[in-house]
Image: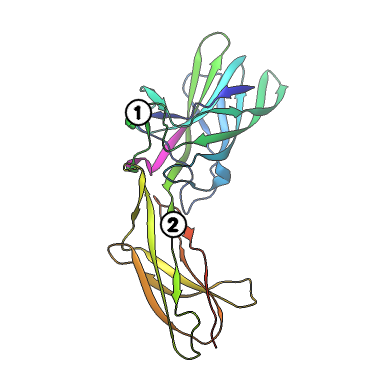
């Protein structure tokens, strides 16, 4: 079945996967009867992190069981009261693939979707785009559209979240450095501002300075640094060997994790 994505949001916009939680297995509470949803997992149980311009495509898997013939079915996230007027977040088409089996009058479909989230083009609501308050936890639900014309809506126990993309810069100097001298590593931590459609400096964040010795593939955290109120990072380390320096931010409930590109310094 090929259909337009209907990633619905009630009285708000969506979100997917909360930091610190495992993949959701959302069981249904049937509202009308005849259709139930379970095993709902967005993005393999990980947060969905969205920037200011790029469309993000993520997997959604779920199981839907029915005792009535279905024309269509969907899983969506919502905020507020289930049953109020909803609006969609995702855009474009998605391929819906479902394996199907029937036993004792119950048809079971195990489904795989690809959901596209575009921060610039929410089809309706919030002025046509994401806003910063959309970075939060959302309830989930499933809806079955019966061939008879009736609709069955199930409230699910799982929640999902949407997160704002973060990014970091890094610069290590001097290059080259004198053995036993000092290396200064600077940078800036930013995150997406959906309301303004740009990136803004993200102050007060705890960010980790990491080092990878020359010839190694492994980074190790050296120290933690708190960004200034304007998101700027700066610290000094002793130059004892050549290698690459970078910053690592582990994110929070509204903002995704990020890692800067590395800056190599030769020590001689």
Q: Which mark is residue 125?
A: 1
Marked residue nearer the N-terminal end (1 or 2)? 1
Nearest the viewer among 248 and 30 is 248
Closest to the camera, between mark 1 and mark 2, is 2
Number of residues whose C-alpha sits closer than 10 Å to that of mark 2, classed few (under 14), some (14–19) or many (20 or more): many
> Is residue 199 rendered magenta in the image?
no
**220 with respect to 238 (left or right):** right
Residue lying furthest bottom: 180
Figure check: 58 above or below 202: above
**228 with respect to 153 (left or right):** left
Q: Which mark is residue 167?
A: 2
- Residue at 46 percent across and 36 percent down: it is 118
> Is residue 135 rendered magenta in the image?
yes
Figure check: 169 above or below 2: below
Figure check: 163 above or below 67: below
What SS does tag 2 mark? strand
Q: Position of residue 173 (x, y in %)?
A: 44, 77
Q: Position of residue 73 (x, y in %)?
A: 56, 22
Q: Quadrant of the C terminus?
A: bottom right
Residue lying furthest top: 148
Q: Position of residue 91 (x, y in %)?
A: 49, 29
Query: Which span is picked out in magenta?
Result: 133-141
Spatial CA span between label 1 and label 2 = 27 Å
- Residue at 36 percent across and 43 percent down: it is 197
């Amino acid at each position: 079945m090929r259909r337009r994505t209907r990633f619905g949001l009630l009285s708000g916009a969506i979100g997917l996967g909360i930091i610190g939680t495992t993949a959701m297995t959302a069981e249904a509470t049937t509202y009308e009867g005849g259709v139930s949803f379970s095993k709902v997992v967005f993005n393999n149980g990980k947060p969905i992190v969205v920037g200011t311009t790029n469309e993000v495509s993520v997997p959604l898997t779920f199981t839907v069981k029915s005792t009535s013939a279905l024309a269509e079915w969907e899983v969506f996230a919502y905020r507020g009261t289930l049953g109020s007027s909803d609006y969609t977040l995702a855009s474009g088409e998605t391929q819906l693939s479902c394996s199907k089996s029937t036993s004792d009058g119950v048809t079971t479909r195990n489904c795989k979707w690809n959901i596209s989230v575009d921060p610039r083009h929410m089809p309706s609501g919030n002025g046509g785009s994401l806003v910063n308050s959309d970075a939060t936890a959302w309830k989930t639900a499933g809806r079955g559209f019966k061939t008879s014309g009736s609709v069955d809506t199930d409230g699910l126990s799982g929640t999902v979240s949407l997160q704002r993309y973060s990014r970091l810069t890094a610069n290590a100097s001097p290059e080259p450095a004198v053995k036993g001298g000092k290396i200064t590593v600077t940078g800036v931590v930013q995150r997406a501002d959906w309301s303004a459609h740009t990136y803004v400096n993200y102050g007060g964040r705890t960010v980790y300075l990491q080092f990878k010795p020359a010839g190694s593939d492994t980074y190790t955290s050296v120290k933690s640094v708190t960004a200034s109120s304007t998101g700027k990072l700066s610290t000094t380390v002793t130059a004892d060997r050549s290698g690459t320096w970078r910053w690592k931010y582990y994110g929070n409930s509204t903002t995704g994790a990020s890692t800067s590109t590395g800056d190599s310094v030769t020590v001689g």
